[in-house]
Amino acid sequence: MRVLAINDISCVGKCSLTVALPVISACGVTCDILPTALLSTHTGGFTGYTFLGLDDEMKKIADHWESLHLKYDLIYSGYLGSRAQIAFVKDIKRRFLKKDGVFVVDPVLGDNFTFYKGFDQAFADEMLSLCREADYILPNETESYLLTGTKDFSAALEMLAKVCPHPVITGAETKDGYYIYYKDDEGERRMPIPHVEGSFHGSGDVVASAFCGCLMRGLPLERALSVSANFCYHAILRTEKEVPDRKYGLNYEREIFGFLRELEANA
């Protein structure tokens, strides 16, 4: 099994590809990477960071890969910095995903119901066009709102289900708790998840990466979400106790063996 993870490399802060590569690989799956940008740190809480877009290099990498006849069982797309990169990922899917392969999109747009710096509604509309090509999409509660225009998660899920067969809204806060909203072949589902107060950078990347690994190991949607969310929760608990400055990311490494035990028990 071979996965391609498309995301940025933030050299400090444990997110994006520095999460995807070790987590997916630990699941017993070969994980290749296609970096979209190189940053000295991630952008959440750090100042003065450096940024280098890799649009030209991405094209050269893909052309070389084509000469190697590479094909992927799953392609996972995360942070994309421009509309041109969104269009390029569509081309990557066409060229490198197996006919029976799985395309997972984490539509990185924002948090706290606002866009990340440099993104706007026009970019969100373009991201929605990428979601139309996905088998699974994993927006957080903010991104579901930015993609649909509604904060009603059931309504957002219904709208996203017209775009993608298996939409998943992660970490949705409601008046009666926190849930993962998702749609399977039988309709809308709502999975309760534990919650720790505060912001933990990189948690979405941990969930998405673990989810891709679980899919590749044959777990059905519900179990893949449950195992991935449980892994993230325990990583958050450990981070809360052991990492005073949360912008440096989740201490997921110390919880990965528990994640793998649960994965093996369900595979």
Image: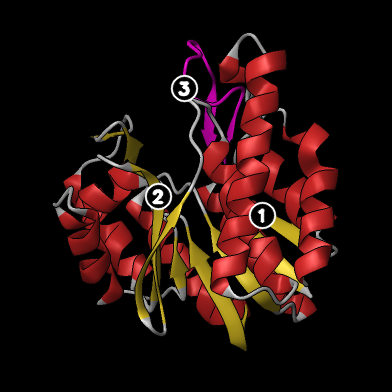
Disc 3 versus disc 1: distance between alpha carbons? 22 Å
Q: Nearer the viewer, mark 1 or mark 2?
A: 2
Residue 153 in percent (x, y) is at: 24, 55
Rendered residue at 70%/62% (across/down)? 213
Residue annotated with mark 1: 210
Residue 41 in percent (x, y) is at: 59, 22
Rendered residue at 51%/52% (across/down)? 78
- Image quadrant where one finds the C terminus: bottom right
* Disc number for residue 179: 2
Rendered residue at 71%/77% (across/down)? 218
- Indicate yes or no whether the magenta region holds residue 42: yes
Element class at badge 1: helix
The reply to whether dot 1 and dot 2 touch (C-beta < 8 Å) is: no
Q: Is residue 245 above or below residue 210?
A: above
**Viewer-nearest residue: 267 or 77:** 267
**Viewer-nearest residue: 25 or 124:** 25
Q: Label 3: how many residues lie within 10 Å, few (<14), some (14-19) or many (20+)?
A: few
Identify the magenta region: 36-53
* Disc number for residue 44: 3
Q: The disc labelled 3 sits on which kind of residue?
A: Gly
Q: Nearer the viewer, mark 2 or mark 3?
A: 2
Q: The disc labelled 1 sits on which kind of residue?
A: Ala
Disc 1 versus disc 2: distance between alpha carbons? 18 Å
The reply to whether dot 2 and dot 3 touch (C-beta < 8 Å) is: no
Disc 2 versus disc 3: distance between alpha carbons? 24 Å
Residue 141 in percent (x, y) is at: 32, 45
Tell me the chief SS of the magenta region.
loop
Element class at badge 2: strand
